[in-house]
Amino acid sequence: MDNTGSYGDKPRVMSQESQVTSQGSSTIYRNIKTIDGARLGQIHTQRGIINTPAFIPVGTNATVKAMNQDELRELGAEIILANTYHLYLRPGHEVIKKVGGLHRFMNWQGPILTDSGGFQVFSLSPLRKITNEGVEFRSHLDGSTHFLTPEFVMEIQAVLGSDIVMAFDECTPYPATKEYALNSLKLTTDWAKRCKEWIHDARYKMQDKEIFIMNPASCVLHQSLFGIVQGGVYKDLRKQSVEELIEMDFDGYAIGGLSVGEPKELMYEIINYTTPLLPPDKPRYLMGIGDLVDVLTAVSVGIDMFDCVMPTRNARNGTLFTSEGRISIKREEFKADPEPLDPDCECYTCKNYSKAYLRHLFMNKEILSMRLNTLHNLHFYLSFFKKMREAIRDETFDNFKKEQTLILQNNFV
Amino acid sequence: MDNTGSYGDKPRVMSQESQVTSQGSSTIYRNIKTIDGARLGQIHTQRGIINTPAFIPVGTNATVKAMNQDELRELGAEIILANTYHLYLRPGHEVIKKVGGLHRFMNWQGPILTDSGGFQVFSLSPLRKITNEGVEFRSHLDGSTHFLTPEFVMEIQAVLGSDIVMAFDECTPYPATKEYALNSLKLTTDWAKRCKEWIHDARYKMQDKEIFIMNPASCVLHQSLFGIVQGGVYKDLRKQSVEELIEMDFDGYAIGGLSVGEPKELMYEIINYTTPLLPPDKPRYLMGIGDLVDVLTAVSVGIDMFDCVMPTRNARNGTLFTSEGRISIKREEFKADPEPLDPDCECYTCKNYSKAYLRHLFMNKEILSMRLNTLHNLHFYLSFFKKMREAIRDETFDNFKKEQTLILQNNFV
């Protein structure tokens, strides 16, 4: 694909800086190895390298709940996710602009991916009205009415200054008729095009000088735009969506609209079908899915990036991942257990605290409970992804997948 | 005072180890300097030195809320407080015994002081019945009925293995008639005597071998017992209480029953009157008072130790201490303020995060808000105490007190 060819009459003579950014973004995917579909790779961004398959901890409100940013770094997180919808509503993107962008606001210097808000409007807003122009919705915080368009969502993300920005999409619900899914897909394609055009115009014309001036280090010049594949559970629609997005040449491709209520087998079918259709030279991101059995399946067909609240939310609910399966820390049997949660685990929690103490903190709803549990679960997830990458490198991924799938089914909750 | 003389017919021939502990405890107060009543000193314990005047962060449930134990160490906390009442109810002292004592349970190797539970029964229990024998009360957690006696409270604290244990007392309420206060005082004296006898018996006879075997490092052999002065707002009763406690020769002396509703001037009067009555060679502890203006007043008459939830609880409510006074982080003016909370502050929060981010986290009730705020306020308190010690050392405490009293009255909440 020619990254500049699709812009027709746009200027071709550019400064050195523009030439770099004219490649579409400062994000480049480098494939290291592909074994039976599973991909080991790296995403190079201006703020650091992301080793893939990568897990992206979720920091909805510009904070990965219970963690500070140094802990995230020490845990080995190479990228985090923040939510456009939440940050637009509170504190507002204008606030973050004044403070100098999201990285400075939250004191995280690594790459940030921002979700476009499509999914949050779909799942959080008590009332929404979708038109071709955009989505009118009510805030889940105070009921106030807002209108998001593809252009506005891109503008918000430009102001936030995230490294990877997502196109605005309509998340097709499940179940949905094929007619609904098709219309939804058409809308998503149209919006993706408008997002692409907005960022293109902003890049070439530098029209939004204010953004550049306020937040030069993280302006649109350096942002990578990912398109989101929709199409519900209909394979032909997924194919159509992929083709329409590829035609527009995005910096990366996400699969959206899954894990919204459909049976697991159907979800796997769509992942298995859709992923290989995506361009091999671009990162592939399966949105919002983080059950590790699902992750293993998706990695085996070539997904590179995952985000999910599972490790962090489960931690706060007392469900912890161990090398022998998941357990609930509130179990009576741990009441006076002086042993660490997982003797094989090298995390701060397991090296310093007993199950008895973790249970006590949880039963008392102590803040330290949420901290220690979150630290442990994120460590488990990030280590799991590291092991997965090593298995692909060592060409033992198939075995790893089989072994881990068995262990992950152990549930002592 | 002869530390062994008061035990009459108790054995005088002891092993080397017993001889050390027969001195009353392994805690020794060393006075470095006293200027106009204000004392600079050190309390030497088997688990480390506590520089006085000392602030003791409150870890009610064996956790200083929102902090981990490494952070407490890094902040410079030299001792923390835990509550006998809370730990007895949950997880239960037997649980902590099985895990090897409170230090191991919570992974804090420094000194721990445990409150006796007297104040908590007074303030938390929905129903309590006081007899000479002890106190029957209902748990604030589940309404279950419990009976605490001086001996049982000592046993619980022995099992916990805290370094400084408090005698069981009745906290005289305010207002109280002189008759009530006198009866309450008599009870407190009687209970203090029973606590002293219990620990003496346990030390000499090693009668509670089980405690020793289960938790040898932190058994009664090494514990220091502090008596608590009561007497309400009646000076003659305070004097009587002091004299009766001194007669029994405690390892340290606490002033209890203040800040329970009496006017501040009256509280100051009692502190100013009572403190100089206490033996100069023992640590003096003003219980539960931590307003820094009160602290300055109390230090100026010779108090060495303070505990208070003020820095930690205020932090969680968004009230933060700065070098210019206290502020509420939720103020609208901080919405887009990129500056640190206090440019003069060296804490992790101020070195890494802006007021805008702190406000955002607070408005979203994020766990990181409670963490960063608590870290800052504890840093402020511990630094304040350090400066106070330096001022006594440099003989500038009087000026320090005047300057800080003015600043501390600035309230931008």
Image: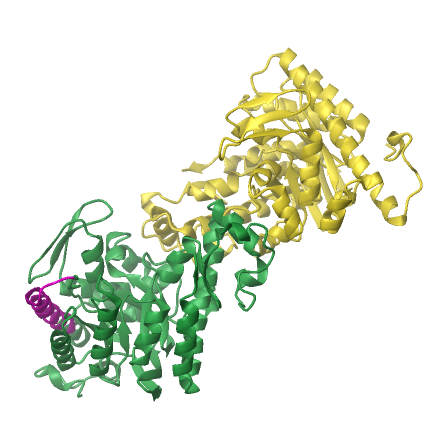
Chain colours: A yellow, B green
Q: Is residue A399 left or right of residue B186?
A: right
Q: Identify the main secondary structure in magenta.
A: helix
Q: Where does residue B28 sit, x and y in percent of width and height? A: 30, 82
- A31 w.r.t. A241: above or below: below
Q: Which residues are magenta?
A: B175-196
Q: Where does residue A365 sit, x and y in percent of width and height? A: 37, 47
- Residue A239 visible in rendering: yes
Whether the magenta-drawn stretch holds residue B376 is answered as: no
Q: Is residue A66 left or right of residue A214?
A: left
Q: Where does residue A208 sit, x and y in percent of width and height? A: 77, 41
Which of B10/A401 is in front? B10
Q: Residue at x 57, y 27 (%)?
A: A137
Q: Is residue A354 left or right of residue B22?
A: right
Residue A26, located in which quarter of the rendered image? top right
Image quadrant holding the N terminus of chain B, namely bottom left
Which of B339/B104 is in front? B339
